[in-house]
Amino acid sequence: MPVVIIIITISTLVIVPWVTFIATSRETTTNATGREEEFYAADAGLQAVIKDLIQGSDPLGVYTPPTITVNGYTPTISITATSASQQVPFSTILADPESTGGLASLAASATFQYVIRNVETSTPMYINWNYAPTGSTRIRLYQGVGIGGTLVLGGTASTLPRVLNIDGSLIIGGTYTIEYANLSGVTIATTAFSYTGSAGTTWIRTVAYRDYKITSVVGQAKVVATVRQSPGSSSSTRSVHIISQLEN
C-alpha cells in the first residue's frame, strides 16, 4: 500500500466576544457552516489529485485535475513543481517494474523496456529480477528514454536472481530505461514484486521522486499541500507523501 505522511498546520481560531456572538449568532452560524462546506470541498479536490498521483498521473504533463463537486461547491485546483521540500530526507524505495504487467511473461528472445524518471543524482540503483524457468537473461541500464541513449551498465547471466548493481558514481540523475531481455529459447515468467525486497522477487531499489505544490480553493477556503510522488509518473508502484498541508 502507498505510504502517506501528513503534517497539518491549521490556521488560528479567533473567538469573538460573548455579546457580539449573541447579537450575530444566526449569521455567524450560517457563515461557519458555509465556510466548513467550502473547506470540505477544497480538501476533496486536493485528495482527488493525490489519488491520481498514486495511480501514476503526471500532474505537469497531459493532465486535467478531476472535477469534484461537494455540497454544491467545485474547487479550483492548480499544481506547480516545487523544490522546497527537497530538504526533507528521503531514503531509497522499492519500485515495481511492471512485474505483473509487461514484464510478467517474456517469450524467447523478447525484451521489455521499463522507464523510470526523477532519479536523484549520485544515488546507487539495484535491480533484482527473479523468474522461471532458469535461463540466460540480460539487464541493461540506459540513460534517457529507450535504448538509444547512453548505456550505463549491463550484464548477461543465467543464475537466479538476475541482478544489476549500479554504483551511484554512474548515476547523473533524470530519466533512465531498464532493458530486460530473455536470451533463452523458452518463455519465462517473472516472479511478482514484493515490498520485502527479497531475492526471490522482482524489484528496483533506487532514489527517485518529484515534488509538487497543490492548491485547492473554494470561496474563502484554501488548502495547500506540498506532496512528493515516488518514484514518479512512469512507474507502476508509487507512493505519495504529503510533506506539508496548510488549511485556511
Image (cartoon, rainbow, N blue to C red):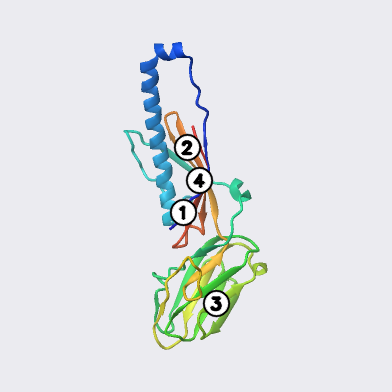
Three-letter code for the amino acid on which mark 3 is drawn = Val
Sequence-first tag of 1 and 4:
4
Q: Residue at x 40, y 71 (%)?
A: 102
**What secondary structure is marked by label 3?**
strand
Q: CA distance from mark 1 to mark 4?
A: 21 Å
Q: Residue furthest right?
A: 169
Q: Quadrant of residue 112?
A: bottom left
Q: CA distance from mark 2 to mark 1?
A: 20 Å
Residue 24 locus on image (x, y percent): 40, 14
Q: Residue furthest left?
A: 72
Q: CA distance from mark 4 to mark 2?
A: 13 Å
**What secondary structure is marked by label 1?**
loop
Q: Residue at x 51, y 75 (%)?
A: 199
Sequence-first tag of 3 and 2:
3
Sequence-first tag of 2 and 1:
1
Q: Are marks 4 and 3 in contact (CB under 8 Å)?
A: no
Residue 243 locus on image (x, y percent): 54, 46
Q: Is residue 147 visible?
A: no
Count residues near mark 3 (Cα–Cα under 10 Å), then give few for <14, some for 14-19, many for 20+: many
Q: Which residue is mark 4?
A: 6
Q: Residue at x 55, y 67 (%)?
A: 205
Circle 4 or circle 2, nearest the eye = 4
